[in-house]
Amino acid sequence: MSEPAPKTLVVLAAALGWNLIEKHQPATKIRFRPVAPGPLSLTCPAQATLRTALPPSRHGIVASGWFHRDLARPWFWEQSAALVHGRRVWEDARAAGQTVGMAFWQQSLGERLDWVLSPKPIHRHHGGIVMDCYSRPEPLYAELCADLGRKFDLFHYWGPLARAKVGRWISAATLRILARPDAPDHLFVYLPSLDYDLQRHGPDSPQAAAALAETLAQIEPLIAAAEAQGRAWLLAGDYAIEPVAPGDGAVFPNRILRDAGWFHTRETARMLYPDFFTSRAFAIVDHQIAHVHVPDPADRPRVRERLAQEAGIAEILDAAEQAERDVYFPERSGDLLLVAAPGRWFAYPWWTEPRQAPDYANQMDIHNKPGFDPCELFFGFPPPHTSQKTEKIRGTHGRSGPGHEIAAAGLFPEAKTFLDLAAGLRNRLSPMR
């Protein structure tokens, strides 16, 4: 029998793409290499792949949110670990008596772990938010706040005020966790903040170069701490952000479907809300990916034909074609999957007149919108309303293939794909390797 797996640190950094390393040539001792991304270059699918060593077709995370057919509504950014199917890469290590922790990963609540730390705000009944983090063991978050002298700020995590400061808090908290005598043997950490200015200003901008330098300044102390403890470490991005086409790169599939009479709405207080109960076709969007649901199979050829006329859509995949790419999960995937053209991205709105916008359109509301809304990174008027101007977005992601490689460093230098990294991690954490 071989020796138990050594201790590890796994850092997943949002938007750490190989294109950034090539373009900005950051001053760092970290030796990066390009790795092909997963078939869906999106946050939650990548996180699920790294923790299961499975593709989306098997772990079931087909975007960062999807349409729940039994509820007839979309849900984004849900936190239950039960949403992720498949055996975890750390299960053998835990069975052998080692401990595992996860900090700031999505869908980590309820995970069978020894340590969990994740944002979990409380929404007040009459409005407002109590900013809080969920932690197991429960005193962990309070102890970290006391040690750091400040709480985690949810408004720096997403929205118009999102900034690198949130990554500094996570990095500092991770260093405190690693320094504890009861630190988990294997710790998975997610750093979100590189993503913000890349979406606001594009990956080729001076702001992107500054954001990359800031993120590496957050990561380098973690690697140093891991090496000082004899921990093996893995650093990887989850996707690469590409520049948005000049002008407005947004594509509006729900407007197309509504104009064709397939997407239905109901008017309430002069605002148009979606009617998912009767709609014959609608899109749930996530950056450069859109799941189009067409309940009646007889409608699908016509819907596909109409969407194919849109220049901003590069590919339209049916269920069989999605299965070939390992991204189809029957209970969650759309009947059609749209892939945006280079430099284009999918926006969820179906209305054209500002007065028709539902009340959540100019709010930071990550759960009710039927799609990811990058416009929430900007203030609208009057603040604290968020923008609805899609032309402000300068960076996007979701497409895979050549030119969209992520940056990786540390363990598994032989890995060619993101799934290779996950498989290597699974084998590394097995005490019987």
Image (spheres, rainbow, N blue to C red):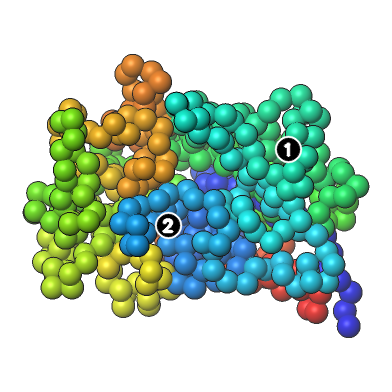
Residue sitting farthest toward the front: 125
Q: Callout 1: few (<14), some (14-19), or many (20+) C-alpha neighbours within 10 Å?
A: many
Q: Residue at x 27, y 68 (%)?
A: 335
Residue 321 falls left or right of residue 398:
left
Left or right, residue 416 beside residue 96: left
Q: Residue 320, position in %: x, y?
A: 31, 78
Q: Residue at x 60, y 40 (%)?
A: 119
Q: Residue at x 37, y 77 (%)?
A: 324
User: Could you tell me residue 263's position as x and y percent?
Assistant: 16, 52
**Disc 2 target residue:** 63
Q: Residue 99, position in %: x, y?
A: 80, 60
- The answer to whether residue 224 of the structure is visible from this angle is no
Give the Cα separation between the discs numbered 1 and 2: 29 Å
Residue situated furthest top in the rendering = 382
Q: Which badge, 1 or 2, comes first in the chain's sequence?
A: 2
Check contact, mark 1 vs mark 2: CB within 8 A.
no
For residue 248, say whether it is visible: yes
